[in-house]
Amino acid sequence: MSTITPRAVFVTRETEYELLLARHATRDQVRFFLKTRGQDVAAVEARHARFHEALKQTRAAVPPDWRATLVRRGDLDRFLFAADDVIVAVGQDGLVANVAKYLDGQPVLGVNPDPGLYDGILVPLAPARVGGLLVPAARGEVALQRRTMVEAQLDDGQKLLGLNEIFVGHRSHQSARYEIEVGGKGEAQSSSGVVVSSGTGATGWARSLMDSMHVALSLAPEEQALAYFVREAFPSVSTGTSIRAGKIDGTAPIHVTSRMNDGGVIFADGVEQDHLEFDWGRLIEVKVASRRLNLVRP
């Protein structure tokens, strides 16, 4: 058993006010900018204050013998998580998706600093609940929701993980050309891209796709299955539309081969900056990931 005390890793992102201040330098300039757009700086400052009060309350709940650190969303790809970390994500639901792909089994406490602003699907905890959950989480004595993730692996071994979905298409969102194979059936396609979603993503982008495509697919967050959607498939003499949407389990990956000379990309959870290149002849396999997000239940 490790003698090193656990570490609480607080994950945050900049508030709206902090981003405005970074852009406009002073509060007066922020106020002027917002006023020209019919907005009040006081409302933005109030949301900023609520966030920092929630962060202060959660950080104060860390046991005195624990270690603690703070990492911003933009630094996640350079931060080294340890096996005994307990992750405390304070912010909107998307922040949990941002950190999930960098973890390997560590428990995550999602804290909602502003219930009037954020839905709280992935951040269901009030700040006051954190103190009673940190030690049990470190000991593995909490109820976990083991949410399924999506994994994409290129033929050269590069991998990308997503909590909500993986997108395969063209970086400019123009028509992407590729060959797709699902369940032993394949065809050449030209479309706006392929989205492969987990049960978590089924309440987001995938839900919008199901509504627009008039397709109903049941997918639970912990289910070892994925849903796929081909966006706006175009029929022609060389491309088909018979593979449009469906569901795969943990034993049946999706294979896509690029037929794009350039511009092909693969990204996860809407973060286009963190992508894999998907040019002509590259093969990607998309499947249920071996890792899961261990989200602490309220």
Image (cartoon, grey):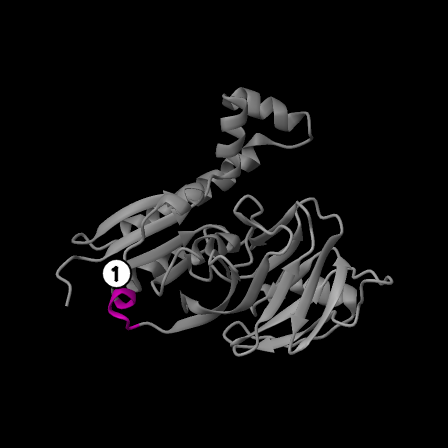
| Magenta span of residues | 136-141
Q: Nearer the viewer, residue 262 or 272?
A: 262
Is residue 188 shown in magenta? Answer: no
Q: Residue at x 70, y 57 (%)?
A: 193
Q: How many marks?
A: 1
Quick check: can you spot residue 53? no
Q: Read off the residue under disc 1.
A: 84
Q: In the rendered view of the protein, which quadrant contains the C terminus? A: bottom left
Q: Residue at x 70, y 72 (%)?
A: 186
Question: Badge 1: few (under 14), some or many (20 or more) residues near its Cα, within 10 Å?
Answer: some
User: Image quarter for residue 165?
Assistant: bottom right
User: Image quarter for residue 203?
Assistant: bottom right
Q: Main secondary structure of the magenta part?
A: helix
Q: Residue at x 24, y 69 (%)?
A: 139
Q: In the rendered view of the protein, which quadrant contains the N terminus? A: bottom left
In the visual, does 159 lie left or right of 33?
left
Residue 144, how many percent across, how many down?
39, 72
Q: Is residue 249 above or below residue 190?
A: below
Residue 226, how many percent across, how many down?
58, 72
SS state under label 1:
loop
Q: Is residue 71 above or below residue 189?
A: above
Residue 233, how many percent across, how many down?
79, 62
Q: Residue furthest left?
A: 3
Quick check: can you spot residue 169? yes
Q: Is residue 71 above or below residue 6?
A: above
Q: Nearer the viewer, residue 145 or 255?
A: 255
Residue 255, how many percent across, how many down?
61, 67
Query: Type of residue at label 1?
Result: Asp
Q: Nearer the viewer, residue 58 or 146?
A: 146
Q: Residue at x 56, y 25 (%)?
A: 30
